[in-house]
Image (spheres, coloured by chain):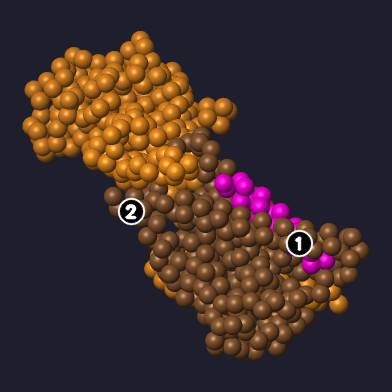
Chain colours: A orange, B brown
Amino acid sequence: MIRRAALLLALAAGLALPATAPAQAPRTAGPAAAQEAIPGAPEPAVRSAPRTAPGEPPAGDAPGAAAPGQRGPEAPAGGGQVVILPQGRDAPPESDDAEKVVAALSHNQVSITTTYAGSEIFVFGAVKRSRPARSERPDVIVTISGPAGPVTVRRKDRSFGVWANRDATVIDQAPSFYAVASTGPLDEILSATENLRHRVGLDLQVRAIGAASDVADPENFREAVIRLMRGRGLYVEAPIEVDVIEDTLFATHVALPANIVEGDYIARVFLLHGGQVLDLHESIVGVRKVGLERWLYALSREMPLAYGLLALAVALAAGWGASEAFRVLRR
Amino acid sequence: MLIYLPIAEVSVDALLILGLGGLIGVLSGLFGVGGGFLMTPLLMLIGIPPAVAVATGANQICASSFSGALAHWRRGTLDTRMGLILLAGGIAGSFLGVWVFELLGRLGQVELMVSLTYVLFLGVVGALMFVESLRALIRARSGAAPRIPKRKRTLAHKLPLKMRFPVSHLYISVIPPALIGALVGFLSAIMGVGGGFIMVPAMIYLLGMPTSVVVGTSLFQIMFVTGVTTLLHATQTFTVDMMLALLLLVGGVVGAQVGAQLGMRLRAEQLRILLALIVLAVCLKIALDLALEPSELYSLAPATGP
């Protein structure tokens, strides 16, 4: 807990100010920039600015704005990672949804070494506002998903007195890892439409499109994937695992188990209000085997014969070594 | 101490694996069996994917049987000529086995096939050995005259292509040993076992070899068959986990030496009855798994086609 609090303080000091200042600076050249750097200052220019899409001319309600060319596209403004969602653009300027999320991960690279036994990723961030915070605290959902792909699911059935695999189907898309943490139960803080759009819920991550042709009850097979992956600790749902401090800072940790696979893991941070997604931050966590693990895996795939021979050589050397060692011991 | 396995892609306790390897090694040195029939199910039990368990098991057994075979060779209880005949059949069998393994993997029936063959072979072999060694033990207890190994004239004596095996004091046809070798090679590939539990009784009862020579010869053949199986799995199914094998075999080779020493202090009948009991216990466990309704009917596998 202390560690997390310290992290959040560092965040408040370091993240909130520098992240806002350079973001706003190119938009309003001149003395206004300094003023805008203060988060929460009621400045109309800032409130409407994030609504403007790249390339659009400056909106009329932005008094402090300079020439169109100076109006930077939105993506770089947020450090290259904040994504402005299309539905936000048409929202009235008076609404409070000019809130953005600034988030970061404790590390963007997970190395699977020989002694890898799982790791923990801290996801932390702040709500960036252009006006005073609303009374209620913000809702945040954090998801981390591993590389997805098709999975074969088989079901045992009794035939001739023995239990054997009979029905099988392919679940088209199932992530190899999926964790959701949020400030509250998903069905309370996220509308069904938004859930569908962003596929936040675990249930929406596992998709079976072609399964219907193989088996009569594809839904059972899809549920089995979720159940089995949960049992292995690869699907994790933690409804109230995101801590929010002072309605602005948030932090959570996602534990990556020891049995994860290699690949690019996508971390998403959703900022929500009233069931709607206000902002979304995406970043990538690279999970890679390193050192001996990397070398062995690469060898086994690229030069299988050499790998097999090496495996044999190691086996024979160990067998001979032990035999000799015991002979010496017995004397 | 947890350790991450690069091919299996799971993290396991290194000490657990070392202990498992050691246990199997003792059995290997004691009975001349590779111990795969115990190892494959045990590896699956601790969360290793079945395909990796089978292929890596073969690699480990190769190491432990090499260690055991060396010990027997020095003691002169290894019939090299018989071993080579068994081997020739074994290599042919293991090619066929890897092919069948791949086919079954695509059909999703590896598990069933492995379980059924286990039940069948372990049951028959275990029961035969148990009855025979029990009878021998009772005879020895009752103070009857020590059993003189009768030179039964089996089928092996009648078939053509006869050959002299001086170490085993036999003059038999090479066809039965080659067939036994082929069967063992086949089983090695699809069950991840050395096949010692088939070969040891087969050599004793079908070929009439002296028990003292059987163990070393069996280990000799197993060493080569599992070596070939390892290579085939490494190049065709990519399921040999060297890290797992290394841990298993460090425990295994030490265990094998302990087992070989232990074996010299036990009587042949006692050895056989012990092995028969272990074989029957494993058989019963697998049979129950097949017959009782499993708690989880569904299983996952990487998609390799429809």
The residue drawn where x is 86% and y is 77% is A331
Please state which amino acid type lies under the numbered disc 1.
Ser
**Cα gap from disc 2 to disc 1, whole angstroms:** 47 Å
Q: Which subunit holds the residue at mark 2? A: B
Magenta highlight: main SS: helix
Q: Which of the 4 quarters of the picture holds residue A281?
A: top left
Could you say whether the residue bearing mark 2 is in a helix, strand or loop? loop
Residue A239: x, y in percent? Answer: 43, 23
x and y, in percent, of residue B136 in the image: 80, 63
Q: Which residue is mark 2?
A: B304
Give whichever of A80, A291 is nearer the camera. Answer: A291
- Answer whether residue B285 is magenta in the image: yes
- Pointer 1 residue: B133
Judge whether A81 appears above or below B61 on screen: above
Residue A21, quarter of picture:
top left
Picture layout, residue A252 above or below residue B280: above
Q: Write down the region rendered in magenta.
A: B267-287
Q: Is residue A305 visible?
A: yes
In the image, taking residue A291 as reference, residue A195 lies left or right, namely: left
